[in-house]
Amino acid sequence: MKNSPLAVLFDWDNTLVDTQDNISNAIKYTLDLMGCSNKAADRNSHESRKSYMVNLFGDQWEKANQIYQQYLDNALLQNIALNQGVEKMLQTLKGHNVYLAIVSNKKNTNLRKEVAYFRLDSYFERVVGSCDTAEDKPSVIPLLFSLEESTLPINRENVFFVGDSVTDILCAQNANCLPIIYGQSISGYEDLLCFQHFDKLTDFIIKYLKNR
């Protein structure tokens, strides 16, 4: 995509869409099948999935992860909703020729089905999920892959990455892009830009483009 003034990349789960109920149900299901129903099911949304699984199940984490993924596969498109203001934001940014992409650690086939379900495909140059590249976030590899259609130099002035987790922040920082938090601020990263509403994020980006 040529002549874009800016690239804005987004995480998917609990950034553009609310999937918290689905994730919570998958965790509870996994705990039950692993015989760990007495353990706390709460998952820190800022923690990576692998880290969570290892901490909870130890050397059985891969088995637990397969159970967890199978539940998510079976529950695809259930208990999922666009967060408020997402489509209006995407329309506005696309109207300003902003390069848009998704970088998620969700299984790639499920991710693209969900994006298609909400009819958002046309807004994004790339929709990158787990298994599309050799590594997942916080590695820079999926982020760089998402930008292959862009001609912008990759730096904090040209590429913003919006997400809700430490994994997203580290991915952006590792690639020398600007991390922006969606939702609640994250302990240890209070100095970063943080927006709880997409209309405010949109206003910030449009103002940024006008002042460049």
Image: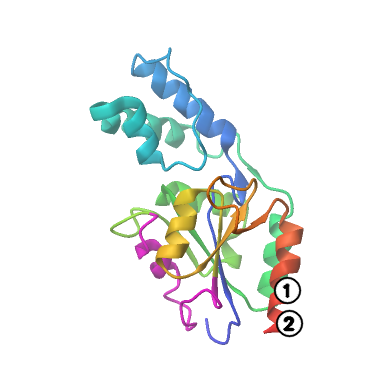
Task: Classify residue 195 as left or right of residue 129.
Answer: right
Image position, residue 54 (x, y; %): 32, 33
Instruction: Tell me the SS state at disc 2.
Output: helix
Q: Does the magenta stretch include residue 203?
A: no
Q: Quadrant of residue 37?
A: top left
- Mark 2 is on which residue type? Lys
Position of residue 4 relative to residue 144, above or below, is: below
Q: Which mark is residue 1?
A: none
| Amino acid type, mark 1 | Ile
Q: How many marks?
A: 2
Which residue is disc 1 drawn over? 206
Q: Mark 2 points at which residue?
A: 210
Depth check, front residue: 37 or 77: 37
Q: Distance of mark 2 from mark 1, alpha carbons?
A: 6 Å
Question: Quick check: can you spot residue 78?
Answer: no
Q: Is the magenta stretch mostly helix, strand or loop?
A: loop
The image shows residue 84, relative to residue 23, as above or below, that is: below
Task: Tell me the magenta residue range.
Answer: 137-159
For image coordinates 60% across by 58% down, the residue present is 191
Identity of the residue drawn at 70% across and 62% down: 201
The part of the image, by quadrant, that contains residue 143 is bottom left
Instruction: Sort mark 1 into few (<14), some (14-19) or many (20+) by Cα contacts within 10 Å.
Output: some
Residue 12 screen position, x and y as percent: 54, 51
What residue is drawn where x is 36% and y is 27%? 56
| Residue that appears at 41% across and 52% down | 108
Q: Is mark 1 on a helix, strand or loop?
A: helix
Give coordinates of residue 144: x percent, y percent: 40, 69
Any part of residue 122 in sight: yes
Q: In this view, does 164 lie above or below 192?
A: above
Image quadrant where one finds the C terminus: bottom right
